[in-house]
Amino acid sequence: MEPSDQPSPRVPLPEGTISVGIGLLIAGVASYAFFKVGTWALGSDAAFAPVSALWFATFALAPGFFLPLEQELGRALAHRRALGQGGRPVVRKVATLGAVLASIVGLVIIFASPVITRAYFDGDWVMVIALLVAFAAYAPAHIARGISSGNGRFHSYAVVMGADGVVRIALCVMLAVVGVKTAGPFGFAVALAPLPGVLYVWSRRQLRTEAGPDAEWNEVTPNLGWLLLGSVFAASLVNAGPVAVNLLADTSQADLVTAFAYGVLLARVPLFLFQAVQAALLPRLSRLAARNELDEFRSGLKRLMMLVLAVGVVGVVGAFLLGPPVIERVYGADLSRQTLTMLALGSATYMLALAIAQAVIALKGHALVSMGWAVGMATFLVVTWLSSDDLYFRVELGLVSSSMTALAFFAFALRSRLRSGVVPTHGSLLEAMTDMPLES
């Protein structure tokens, strides 16, 4: 019997909820540990700055481009599974798309490498190579996750996700133990981390698919364009703060770049926790809508948003009251109360926007979600450019205003979809469950 997490009658959680939640939690904890160990091993925040820059660039690019392939693959395989058809032709189609997409973006990185090296990595060519490797390595990871979710193998999905974080911190500790003092090897720890988990589930034959009818392109690409557009903007927006600070800082401010990254990680604690349990929340609401119980759907969604709002408020208040001593104790960084509070406010608002965006996707509003994230990203660019000359404050304002803009857009879109009487399909539900642009 294939491993899957069937819901218990006593614990009415959707299939895969516990496994995916555990995988996300492990990956999140490993992220915090990686920054702590890496900075300690290299001796200073400034020395770790290139690795921090690589980290946020990787997770702005890889999920942005490959998460839609994962979503469409999972949707198509789940549809075939319901019909009793094998999904191997679908996997081949999506793998081909992944290879083409990875090649195109990889070539763009290569052609732009002189500019990227000079403007973003402060002349470090090794980090550009690590970025190329990281982007390519996440393609098979997302394909593996799509195969796992589409076939109901959520334990394997969690292994791929959790192993990424575990392998990364294990490599980091090994490098620290042997006394590595240059950033390059730590960059490749980020780049190579997703592959062992993929190899493990592949070796256990959890990525196998059965032969089936030939797949047409329209079977795997009905929403791909909108998903790709929205995913690129959503992943870019959630990682935009550290990337912008790195681009705007001068060579004497490398320590400020890493310190800001610590602040972003601390502000994301509620968002990591939310993503670890969100798979249990949205499917339940969507199933109410699928049964045409839209009054209960609205009531349940309202309760969900109140919960998300409460978590966000706790995060903002916690950042204001405890942020400076916590970040000083954990990372030895000195960040102001204003910076930590603004980052927490931006993260909380993004969390609200993400929750509503997932509901809109479940109601087949893919185009609306793409437009919302695009408007949010445009807001970030304009506000960061025009608002202030202060390195931190201009980015903080950009993050808060962009998330608020996206939140308002999605709230309007959700109201419109509910009024129109749209109900989710199994495919749109699966895409909503896996719409998680925050990677770790």
Image (cartoon, rainbow, N blue to C red):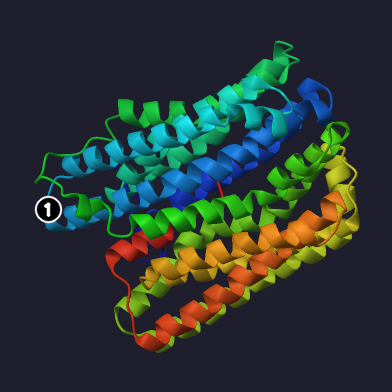
Q: Is residue 176 above or below residue 52?
A: above
**In the displayed structure image, the side of residue 115 where residue 142 appears, left or right:** left
Can you tell which quarter of the image residue 148 is in? top left
Q: Which of 70 and 326 is in front in this view?
A: 70
Q: Nearer the viewer, residue 88 or 84?
A: 88
Q: Quadrant of the C terminus?
A: top right
Q: In this view, does 83 lie to the left or right of 275?
A: left
Circle 1 SS class: loop
Q: Residue at x 74, y 28 (%)?
A: 122
Question: What residue type is disc 1 on?
Answer: Gly
> Measuring 52% from the left and 27% from the top, which residue is drawn there?
110
Q: Please tell me in which quadrant of the rendered image residue 409 appears.
A: bottom right
For the point 74% across and 66% down, the residue is 314
**Residue 230 image point, x, y percent:** 47, 58
Q: Is residue 236 left or right of residue 120?
A: left
User: Residue 229 location, x and y as percent?
Assistant: 45, 56
Query: How dense is the environment of label 1, judged by Cα within 10 Å: few (below 14), some, or many (20 and up)?
Result: few
| Residue 377 at x, y percent in the picture | 61, 59
Q: How many marks on residues?
A: 1
Residue closest to the eye, 152 or 183: 183
Residue where numbered disc 1 is placed:
84
Q: Residue furthest top?
A: 178
